[in-house]
Image (tube, rainbow, N blue to C red):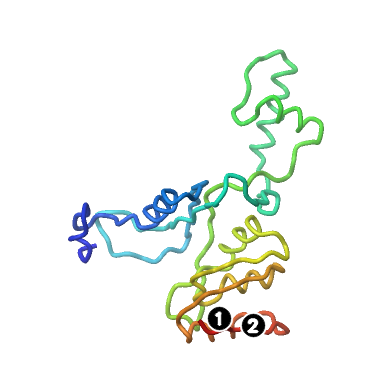
């Protein structure tokens, strides 16, 4: 971006790399940077660029304040695909024939567990999430689609727990929390956005009364 051409170390047309810079700054401050997750947008905003690809992804970072933290892998597990099951069954056939070859992804302990419990119909969630953007008529700014927020909440907060969103905006986090039986605290400086989020959440859950406390 030309407007940032005077920033130290950046040239005109350089990527600013803000998401990663924030992640590294938090890491330097003591946070654990556990994973980068790619939000793949199948319907990205068109761009009239001729010297690079149209951007169709953003980043989500899994960060924690401790080495041990709450993460519910089962809550966000994906449906297992046929190749995963085939790799396991092929591996077992090789062992029965006396072959020492082992398919990538299956160590001995995991294979023994699969033999005992059976091949699961789910697998650990992958780090690329394909979620289409969705318009929200009241907001003139881009809002996160609820389908993107849902796995973050399911994996990172137990039922009945509390989620903090320090940039509440249109209230998507609160909307999803209400649907998933989680409490939430949203912080938003813009009073218009606060009212918009309140209407949106109460409209989705009619019996819910959203409380607002002034900052």
Quarter of the image containing the N terminus?
bottom left
Q: Which of the 4 quarters of the picture holds residue 51?
A: bottom left
Q: Position of residue 117 (x, y in %)?
A: 81, 36
Between the residue at mark 2 and the residue at mark 1, the CA separation in whole angstroms equals: 9 Å
Residue plotted at (48% across, 86% down): 191
Q: Which of the 4 quarters of the picture holds residue 151?
A: bottom right
Which mark lies nearer to you, 2 or 1?
A: 2
Q: Position of residue 201 (x, y in %)?
A: 62, 80
- Relative to 129, is 8 on the left or the right? left
- Relative to 7, is 39 on the left or the right? right
Mark 1 neighbour density, 10 Å: few (under 14) some (14–19) many (20 or more): many
Residue plotted at (79% across, 36% down): 118
| Residue at the far right in the pictured view | 116
**Number of numbered markers:** 2
SS assignment at label 2: loop
Q: Nearer the viewer, residue 131 or 143?
A: 143
Mark identifier at residue 165: none
Q: Position of residue 44 (x, y in %)?
A: 42, 63
Q: Nearer the viewer, residue 193 or 131?
A: 193
Residue plotted at (68% across, 51% down): 72
Pointer 1 residue: 197
With respect to residue 30, does 146 lie above or below? below
Pointer 2 residue: 210
With respect to residue 42, does 201 lie above or below? below
Q: Position of residue 76 (x, y in %)?
A: 66, 53
Mark 2 / mark 1, whichever is N-terminal: 1
With respect to residue 148, does 186 lie above or below? below
SS assignment at label 1: helix
Mark 2 neighbour density, 10 Å: few (under 14) some (14–19) many (20 or more): few
Whether the residues at callouts 2 and 1 have beta carbons within 8 Å, the answer is: yes
């Amino acid at each position: 971006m030309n407007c940032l051409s005077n920033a130290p170390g950046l040239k005109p047309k350089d990527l600013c790399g803000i998401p990663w810079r924030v992640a590294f700054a938090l890491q330097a401050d003591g946070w654990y940077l556990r994973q980068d997750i790619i939000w793949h947008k199948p319907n990205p905003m068109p761009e009239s660029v001729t010297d690079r690809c149209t951007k169709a992804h953003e980043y989500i970072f899994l960060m924690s304040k401790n080495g041990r933290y709450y993460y519910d892998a089962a809550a966000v597990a994906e449906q297992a695909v046929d190749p995963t099951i085939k790799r396991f069954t092929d591996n077992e056939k090789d062992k029965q024939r006396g072959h020492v070859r082992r398919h990538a992804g299956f160590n001995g302990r995991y294979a023994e567990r699969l033999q005992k419990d059976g091949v699961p119909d789910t697998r650990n969630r992958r780090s690329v999430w394909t979620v289409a953007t969705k318009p929200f008529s009241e907001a003139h700014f881009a809002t996160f689609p609820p389908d993107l927020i849902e796995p973050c909440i399911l994996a990172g907060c137990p039922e009945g727990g509390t989620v903090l969103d320090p940039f509440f905006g249109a209230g998507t986090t609160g909307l999803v929390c209400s649907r998933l039986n989680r409490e939430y605290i949203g912080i938003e400086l813009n009073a218009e956005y606060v009212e918009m989020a309140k209407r949106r959440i109460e409209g989705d859950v009619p019996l819910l009364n959203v409380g607002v406390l002034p900052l």
